Image (cartoon, rainbow, N blue to C red):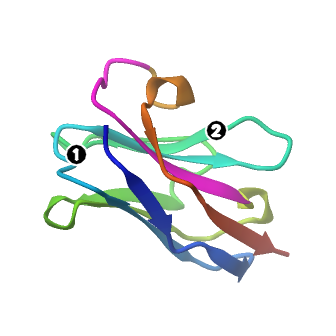
Amino acid sequence: QVQLVESGGGSVQAGGSLRLSCAASGNIYNLRMGWFSQAPGKEREGVAAIYTGNGITYYGDSVKGRFTISQDNAKNTLYLQMNSLKPEDTAMYYCAATFWPGGIWYSPHEYASWGQGTQVTVSS
């Protein structure tokens, strides 16, 4: 289990960009790490994920071509570059990690460690 802390959220206009960071308490190598979003009254949804052992990435259909997930093992940090933001992207964004990468990447139940979240608000 690792401790995770998100940062980088904020308020932007539609079409703008944000870069979210997730700082981990230890080495993030050989983990599946993901970004999830949760809007008020809705379920937590998978945005993107990466297996840090080989760099293979996964994206939700709604963010493909707009968001990019990446890692910096030397800094023990996960990133989410968010471009061409839409009002529909407005949500709390959470970083998550698991030692077991065999499950469905976009299922929150597969992840054991979670950060406290960072708010992203996109206005029209």
Q: Where's residue 78, x and y in %?
A: 34, 59
Give the residue at x 36% y 50%.
3
Residue 57 visible in image: no
Estimate how packed mark 1 is, as few (under 14), some (14 to 19) or many (20 or more) residues with alpha carbons within 10 Å.
Answer: some
Q: CA distance from mark 1 to mark 2?
A: 21 Å
Which residue matches tag 2?
45
Is label 1 in a helix, a strand or a loop? loop
Give the residue at x 67% y 67%.
120
Q: Quadrant of the C terminus?
A: bottom right
Q: Where's residue 62, x and y in %?
A: 64, 47
Q: Where's residue 28, x and y in %?
A: 22, 48
Magenta residues?
91-103
Most foreground residue, 51 or 86: 51
In the rendered structure, which disc, 1 or 2, sits on the residue that comes first in sequence?
2
Which residue matches tag 1?
55
Give the residue at x 83% y 49%.
40
Q: Is 28 within the magenta?
A: no
